Image (spheres, coloured by chain):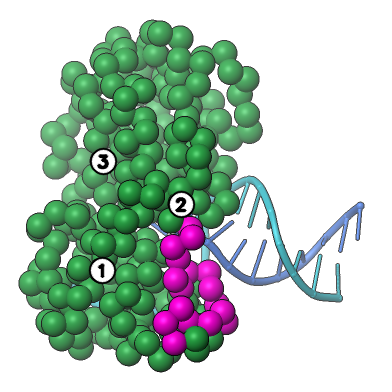
Chain colours: A green, B cyan, C blue
Amino acid sequence: MPELPEVETTRRGLSPLISHQTIKQVVVREARLRQPAVPEQLNLAASQRIQQVNRRAKYLQLQLQSGEIIIHLGMSGHLRVVSQDTPVKKHDHIDIVFTNGQCLRFNDPRRFGLVVWNDLPLAEHVLFQHLGPEPLTDAFDSEYLYQKSRKRRQSIKPFIMDNQTVVGVGNIYAQESLFKAGINPKREAGRISFSRYQVLVREIKHVLEKAINLGGTSLKDFYQTDGKPGYFAQELLVYGRESLPCTHCETPLKAIKLGGRASTYCGTCQR
DNA sequence: CGAGCAACCTGCATGC
DNA sequence: TGCATGCAGGTTGCTC
């Protein structure tokens, strides 16, 4: 699934294709997503024009004249722009149909994603209420992360994956950032020095920026909107590399579970 | 309150 | 070949 770089890649690919398109109707074939897709609400978008395609955390926002459609890709969601008469495939749950005969087609095998209507002011939407800062903005800096971590007994990895700490850092990029920063994923967040947080914040930003520039990470089922894979997969240093040699010191990488998520790291380079 | 864990779902790889 | 098991890029809601 998509972490922030994959969602941002999707946004950038989609934006030129659907900005300024007028929505004709929204077709819901399968409403049972993380939150139910309500056709009557989604069709309030009908005859409105898409002004902009935005992103907050891992949510995409199709900004309309009044209101927005919020989309989350969950673990397995995809968006494609296709002709409206393209035959429907398995798990093609929702079509946002445009007046030009094309549609934005949402496919999500595991149905952890969502497509919902919102016409409240953005900050008030319940989905966004408890989100931390965007990792690529100045609001996310070492001062912030250090202060936020004080008295936290939680391990650093689940701490930076928590959307209330910072948004968009998922299981791949948390592992990669911690490796680059030389921090053991098990280390207590509250017992990490300010100077180490300076390094960590820098690495989180670098890793995410680089992944965005390469079009995200394609593991099995993520593709950019033009059908090409994301090329960050070949940059992965620890994710999915259990028992393979560390790229820095050759020690076989260890794999543990933290907060229920697989975590690979180097016991020598990460302290 | 923080922290850990199960649950939500389907598809795929693995092992018997 | 079939079947059971475990795992997957996220988020939330329930426990303690």
Q: Nearer the viewer, residue A40 or A8?
A: A8
Q: Residues within 10 Å of mark 1 (few under 14, many from 20)?
A: many
Picture residue at 28% right of the left edge, 21% below the top:
A19
Q: Residue A203, which numbered label? A: 1
Whether residue A105 is situated above or below residue A141 in the rendered picture: above
Identify the amino acid type marked 2: Tyr
The chain identifier of the residue carrying mark 2 reads A
Picture residue at 44% right of the left edge, 87% below the top:
A249
Closer to viewer: mark 1 or mark 2: 2
Relative to A223, is A39 on the left or the right?
left
The segment highlighted magenta reads A233-249
Identify the amino acid type marked 1: Glu
Q: Secondary structure at mark 1?
A: helix
Q: Residue A231, which numbered label? A: 2
Closer to viewer: mark 1 or mark 3: 1
What is the C-alpha distance between the residues marked 1 and 2? 19 Å
Q: Residues within 10 Å of mark 3 (few under 14, many from 20)?
A: some
In the picture, residue A34 is in which quadrant? top left
